[in-house]
């Protein structure tokens, strides 16, 4: 029975997408930022059960219930990738800017918090060389991203042995992807396609 349970757990988790996987980064075209505040980023993404200073409640709204003082934060984080190989080159940027928020202590042990930040950055550039009957170069670029506004309410019970919390979020933005094919043979016309997604 134990082996069956372990096998079932492994089978279920094998179907879960990798952390941060979205339609826009399935080929490495952007990150979905879910390390939601400066303290979490500083700890390498550990967030779910942490209640230390600097938590904004992005990963777990109940974590702000342990806040002792009214506080605010402003932070910046970024990542840049540049890869070059036999088949082409790839550049990607992810800017976690702006990123600010805070927690306010309310009566009766309640806490209200919130933040505004970049949720995903789809800025990338990719160049791929294609050989065959009609040699060409494919340029793929992306721009834009999504932002997230979140408001949280949290509190405690049983002498602060139980923390509870809830959040409401709004995520919106625009992502624009562009594909351009340049053929080596001048008899072929340059081909360009643009796809824009709004949320």
Image: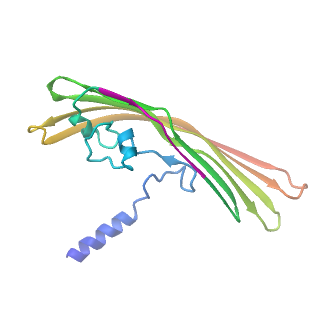
Q: Residue at x 45, y 45 (%)?
A: 33
The colour mode here is: rainbow
Q: Residue at x 29, y 37 (%)?
A: 53
- Between residue 39 and residue 98, name the one nearer to us: 39
- In this view, the residue farthest toward the right is 187
Q: What is the quadrant of residue 197 in the picture?
A: top right
- Between residue 45 and residue 112, name the one nearer to us: 45
- Number of marks in picture: 0
Q: What is the quadrant of residue 151 in the picture?
A: top left
Q: Is residue 154 visible?
A: yes
Q: Is residue 95 magenta?
A: no
- In this view, the residue farthest toward the top is 107
Q: Is residue 109 left or right of residue 8?
A: left
Image quadrant where one finds the N terminus = bottom left
Residue 178 appears at what percent x and percent y? 68, 45
- Between residue 62 and residue 101, name the one nearer to us: 101
Residue 158 appears at what percent x and percent y? 8, 39
Tell me which segment is drawn in magenta: 71-81
Q: Is residue 61 above or below residue 140?
A: above
Q: Is residue 148 visible?
A: no
Q: Is residue 88 left or right of residue 157?
A: right
Magenta residues: mostly which secondary structure?
Answer: strand
Q: Residue at x 68, y 57 (%)?
A: 89
Q: Is residue 168 left or right of residue 118?
A: left
Residue 121 appears at what percent x and percent y? 54, 42
Q: Is residue 143 above or below residue 87?
A: above
- In this view, the residue farthest toward the left is 158
């Amino acid at each position: 029975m134990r082996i069956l349970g372990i096998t079932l757990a492994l089978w279920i988790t094998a179907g879960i997408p990798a952390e941060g996987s979205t339609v826009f980064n399935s080929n490495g075209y952007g990150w979905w930022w879910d390390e939601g505040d400066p303290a979490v980023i500083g700890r390498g993404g550990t967030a779910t059960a942490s209640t230390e200073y600097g938590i904004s409640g992005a990963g777990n709204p109940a974590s702000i219930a342990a806040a002792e003082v009214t506080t605010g934060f402003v932070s910046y984080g970024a990542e840049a990738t540049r890869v070059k190989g036999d088949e082409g080159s790839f550049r990607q940027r992810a800017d976690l800017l702006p990123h600010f928020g805070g927690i306010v202590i309310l009566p009766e042990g309640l806490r209200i918090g919130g933040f505004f930040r970049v949720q995903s950055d789809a800025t990338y550039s990719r160049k791929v060389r294609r050989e065959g009957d009609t040699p060409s170069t494919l340029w793929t670029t992306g721009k834009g991203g999504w932002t997230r506004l979140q408001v949280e309410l949290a509190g405690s019970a049983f002498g602060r042995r139980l923390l509870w919390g809830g959040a409401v979020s709004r995520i919106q933005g625009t992502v624009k992807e562009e594909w351009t094919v340049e053929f080596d043979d001048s008899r072929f016309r340059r081909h360009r396609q643009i796809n824009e997604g709004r949320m």
